[in-house]
Image (cartoon, helix red, strand yellow):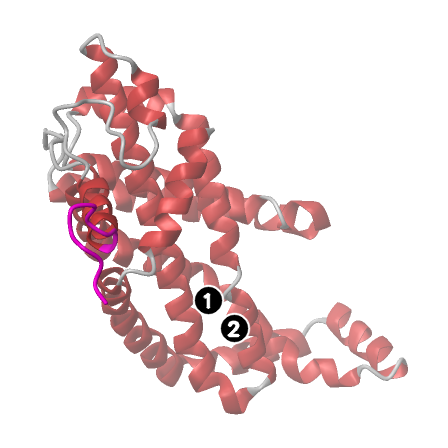
Amino acid sequence: MNLFLSSFWRAVAYCLHPRVVLLSLLPLVLMVALALGAGYFFWDGALAAVRAWLEASSFVNAVWAWLHSVGAGGLKTVLAPLIVIFAVTPLIVVLSLLLVSLLATPALTEFVARRRFPQLARQRGASWLVSLAWSLGATLLALLALVISVPMWLVPPLILVLPPLIWGWLTYRVLAFDVLAGFASADERRELLRTHRGWLLGMGVLCGYLGAAPSLLWASGAMFAAAFVVLVPLAVWIYMLVFSLSSLWFAHYCLAALQAQRAQANGQSPTASMDTPVGTPADPNVIDVEAVTWRDDVNSTLPDPGRPPQP
């Protein structure tokens, strides 16, 4: 539990670093171009198709009549845009995750490794192509699970559980693999994923709920068409920040767990490696760059006892 929470707060702190902000902007540029391009070419056609489908449904027409009788007939104008937006949102989420996984996660993992684990050996248990194949395979399985589970979304509690659970599984499978690909051997990776599967899945589910928050902006864009051009990039940027936070969270957790796993294999205490506070490395031969930098900053602000006070 300590590793779970400490890695989260470290990830939140790292999100404020300028380098992390810049890394989140690269997938954002690509996603904004893709989203706006798709909206320009397909938005009108998609709306027309959904409206035609709604008009042809006798059940929907009965609902319209009832809504009009209770004074809520205006909802008819926003239903078609909402359906299109909620249908497109899962694709945006999946593409955002893939872009962050391929473009940002390796750089964020390397950033965390240089600052916290400079002596952690790199085993290179999987190549970039293997990571890509793993991500695509997990994505296809998640999309298949989404399609199969759509009828169950009609049950009110399940719509709040199934999509985040599927996104969480996808996030855990993709990000944990990408973080460990460059540092753990194949055997180490399999052992770590097996040992920490519950915690990693929980992290993925929480990230899945965080990733559902930008959907509110998409819905707002449907109701406030004048702000739609602004809300779309804002929602995509929030997706990128959420997935960057997820990448950092998995990087801190998985690298610390890998260090503890190797310490245990070498006969050292795994608890000391996983739950050691910042600035106190478990291995005396490992230099914690963050701790050294912090001590230097603090020492530079303290007065020297041997130096006379300045007037």
Q: Residue placed farthest to the right in the image?
A: 69
Q: Quadrant of residue 258?
A: top left
Q: Is residue 305 magenta?
A: yes
Q: Is residue 126 left or right of residue 89?
A: left
Q: Is residue 189 above or below residue 208?
A: above
Q: Is residue 301 above or below residue 203?
A: below
- 204, 94: nearer the viewer: 204
Asked if the residues shown at circle 1 and circle 2 are in contact, with their CB atoms under 8 angstroms apart, the answer is yes
- Locate residue 162, reporting x and y percent: 57, 44
Q: Disc 1 or 2, which lies upstream in sequence?
A: 1
Tell me which residue sits at (52%, 58%) in the image: 212
Read off the magenta span.
301-311
- The main secondary structure of the magenta stretch is loop
Crowding near pointer 2: few (<14 within 10 Å), some, many (20+)? many
Q: Is residue 92 left or right of residue 53?
A: left
Q: Is residue 216 above or below residue 293?
A: below
Tell me which residue sits at (22%, 34%) in the image: 180
Q: Is residue 270 magenta?
A: no
In the rendered structure, which amino acid carries the disc numbered 2?
Trp
Q: CA distance from mark 1 to mark 2?
A: 10 Å
Q: Quadrant of residue 267?
A: top left
Q: Secondary structure at mark 2?
A: helix
- Locate residue 236, reporting x and y percent: 39, 69
Residue 218, labelled with which disc?
A: 2
Q: Is residue 69 left or right of residue 76?
A: right
In the rendered structure, which amino acid carries the disc numbered 1?
Val
Crowding near pointer 1: few (<14 within 10 Å), some, many (20+)? few
